Structure formats: C-alpha cells, structure tokens
Amino acid sequence: MSEKRPLILVCNDDGITAPGIRALIDVMNELGEVVVVAPDSPQSGMGHAITINSTLRCDPHKMDDGPQTEFACSGTPVDCVKLAVNVILPRKPDLLVSGINHGSNSSINVIYSGTMSAAMEGALESIPSIGFSLCDYAWDANFESAKPYIKSLAKQVLSNGMPQGVCLNVNIPKSENGEYKGMKVCRQARANWEEEFDARKDPRERSYYWLTGKFVNYDHGEDTDEWALENNYISIVPVTSDFTAHHAISTLNSWDIE
C-alpha cells in the first residue's frame, strides 16, 4: 500500500453492509487510502466488548467498485480495530473513523455504543479517531447532507491530530431540509435511560423480556450535545477513556480509610 496518501481505517457497529458505513467510505475515499474492517452482522450496543471465548474470522469483502479494501469480521467493533491494527494493516493508520451510526450516540449513549467503542479503541492505540452518528434510526436514512461536515472535520483531524487518549463523539441531527447551523464543540449532557422490561410468555409459558424505555435529559445547559442537537447543530464532544471521578477524590480522602 502507498504511504503517500493518509491511511484511513473505517469501522462501525451496524455491520459492513449498513448504508451509514457505505456513506462514510465514500467520504474517506476522497481523503486517503481506505481500509474497512467492520462486523459481518449488526453489533449495536456491544460497547467495548471483545471476543475471548471463541475464534474470530476476518474475510475479504466487496460490495461496490470503490478503491477501498474491505474485510468483514465475525467479532465486535473493538475486535475489528484490534485485528486491523495488529494483523491487517501494514502500519498504524493516520485516522480511524467509525460509523456513520444509524441513531444517536449523544450523552450517556456513548458508554453503550459499539460505534464509539471502536473510536475509543483507536484512541487507546494513539490513532486520531472519530465516531460519527446520525440521529435517525431508519435504515434508509439520508446521509448526504452530513457528508461535507464529515469531510471537513476529518481533514482537520488529519492535519492537527488529537490529544493523547482522546477521540471525538460527533452526532448529527436529523434535518428535514438537509441544512445545519454548523458544528459546535460541546460537553456530554447529563442524561439517562428510564428503562422498562416488557414481560411476555413463550408457547411453553416461560417468561421472556424486551428491553424498552425512554431517554430523559436532566441537563438544561446550553453547552451540551443535547442542546446542540435540539438546535440543529452538529455536536462534537471530546471523549477519553479515563473514567476517574477526579472531583470525588478529595471527598474519599476525607474518609477514615486505612
């Protein structure tokens, strides 16, 4: 592979055939040499899961006549990144992009997201990484209006790099007219899912459950990703793997801990 153009790794969690990743591949082909390593089936909500109790397969895959090289992996999004970096790629990529996810990964959703876990794994490998999500769960969602913004931000990251251990969580609002007010750097809103389980019985009278619930935003700040999305901005949140609650350290140090 040539080293004259940036080497770009493309991953996702919706699977290699999803329209969102096909749109992302189109954009990245304009910026560099693209290698796709993505799940061979949907892996949404897998978070940072890895496969340790079974084997992994990663086979060449081709859906169109684009110049990209593609592999379909039997594992999780994080498995895809690990295989790409350690087995498939000739060198560390200059950029990792994950998505475009079908549905929002704003606020608390970031911890469940396979899309963002792929980007976080890239950051752990010191690869400038971005996760992209469109706030439209439809399989036939329109990704076209988001493409110029994705290209612009990817070019910025290629030019400037990223702080050590940081990746970007980018969410794109669903736009009825295909227009956005712009992009806004934000903090993650304080929100959560109020969950319910729909209990049912199978033909043998055994109980089973469907997870349901509603997303509730407790945060009314105008500097959050939720505010940006509600006001038709594309939100950009820098994310890190350091889960330390730094503000709680002084409180814990005041306890009688021996």
Image (cartoon, rainbow, N blue to C red):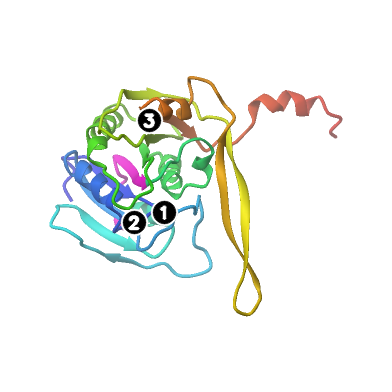
Q: Amino acid at mark 3?
A: Met
Residue 238, given in percent of the width and then of the height, sits at 44, 30
Q: Return the disc, 1 or 2, that comes first in the chain's sequence.
A: 2
Q: Amino acid at mark 1?
A: Pro
Residue lying at 46% horizontally and 46% vertically, measured from the top left: 117
Q: Which residue carries the number 2 mark?
A: 38
Q: Amino acid at mark 2?
A: Ala
Residue lying at 60% horizontally and 78% vertically, measured from the top left: 203
Decide: marks 1, 2 in contact (CB < 8 A)? yes
Number of dots carrying numbers: 3
Q: Distance between the Cα atoms at labels 3 and 1? A: 21 Å
Q: In the figure, residue 233 lies in which quadrant?
A: top left
Q: Distance between the Cα atoms at labels 1 and 2? A: 7 Å
Specify few, some or many for label 2: CA neighbours under 10 Å numbering under 14, 14-19, or 20 or more: many
Q: Which residue carries the number 1 mark?
A: 77
Asked whether 78 or 212 is in front, the reply is 212
Specify few, some or many for label 3: CA neighbours under 10 Å numbering under 14, 14-19, or 20 or more: many
Asked whether 82 or 116 is in front, the reply is 116
Q: Could you tell me if residue 89 is visible in this image?
A: no
Span of residues in magenta: 87-101
